[in-house]
Amino acid sequence: MEISSKEFKHCNLVSISGRVDSATAPQFTQALDKLMEKGIYKLVIDMHGLEYMSSAGFRALLAAQRNCKRYNRGEVVLAAVPDRIREALELAGFTELFKTYKEPLDAVGSL
Amino acid sequence: MSAKEFPAKFDYLDEVREYVGEKARAAGFGEKDIYSIQLATDEAASNVIEHAYEGVPDAFFELTCEFKNDRMTITLLDHGKTFDPSKVDVPDVKADLSDRKIGGLGIYLMRKLMDEVRYESTPSGNLLTLVKRKA
């Protein structure tokens, strides 16, 4: 799993690629926590290069969304979600909790 | 039927998914079903590692795969603490953000992704059986 973060005027674009499972989810959580500790609560997660995500990754997303939405200070949105991952997110009812965009830059513009 | 032993460590989940993915591909499942089988098996193995073998170093579990009569049957056998997934509360996947439960999601996905999920406590250990029918 690879994570990189790019700063925009109103939000950060977090690109995640590879596989997120119980082994790698803690790194994902850590990367998101680091941004939130800096006071960045508007996050776009670009999943373009993501091959796989288990419920361990879903839990990391849920925790970040809770933290970001607290006091209406921000939001986590998802972009370029691959079909298989989107289907699993739908099964888990997560597509109700996250706005999703096809284009990462559209997501950036929305925040 | 093929069987393989895996160390009960999260670092081996990649290999677990590859193992069942190859079997599913060889059996002629499509990409969507292969992903479902890999995800369900990962969730099952993660539960074994996290709950059945909680705090137990150097533990192993056995994974078997069999394709017969258009059905892929995967079993996981461990010798850890009894962990009956059917006793875990089903999460409300329609709940609001603030009411979402973090636990039980893996088991919920397993049930949604597979056609059958069975748990038995046997003399040789905890046996979880996952079945996927080929459409």
Image (tube, rainbow, N blue to C red):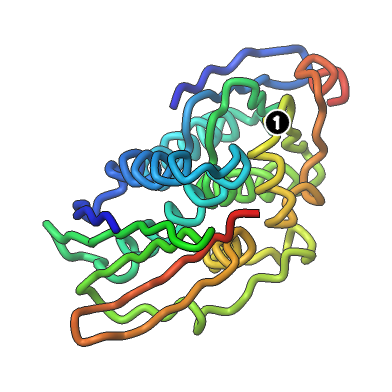
Q: Is residue B60 left or right of residue A54?
A: left
Q: Quadrant of the image for the N terminus of chain B?
A: bottom left
B74 or A99: nearer the viewer: B74
Q: Residue at 81% of width from left, 51% of height from top?
A: A96
* Residue situated furthest right in the rendering: A110
* Residue situated furthest front in the rendering: B69
Q: Residue at 54% of width from left, 62% of height from top?
A: B110
Which residue position holds label 1? A81
State the image coordinates of residue B85 (x, y, percent, origin top left): 47, 76
* Residue situated furthest left in the rendering: B58
Q: Chain of mark 1?
A: A
State the image coordinates of residue A103 (x, y, percent, origin top left): 80, 18
Q: Is residue B98 above or below residue A24?
A: below
Q: Is residue B1 left or right of residue A47?
A: left
* Residue type at tag 1: Val
Q: Residue at 77% of width from left, 43% of height from top?
A: A98
Q: Is residue B100 left or right of residue B28?
A: right
Q: Is residue B110 above or below residue B120?
A: above
B117 or A59: nearer the viewer: B117
Mark 1 falls on what kind of element? loop
Q: Quadrant of the image for the C terminus of chain B?
A: bottom right
Q: Is residue B115 left or right of residue A27?
A: right
Query: Quick one: label 1, few (<14), some, or many (20+) residues within 10 Å?
Result: many
State the image coordinates of residue A70 (x, y, percent, origin top left): 74, 49
Q: Quadrant of residue B84 in the image? A: bottom left
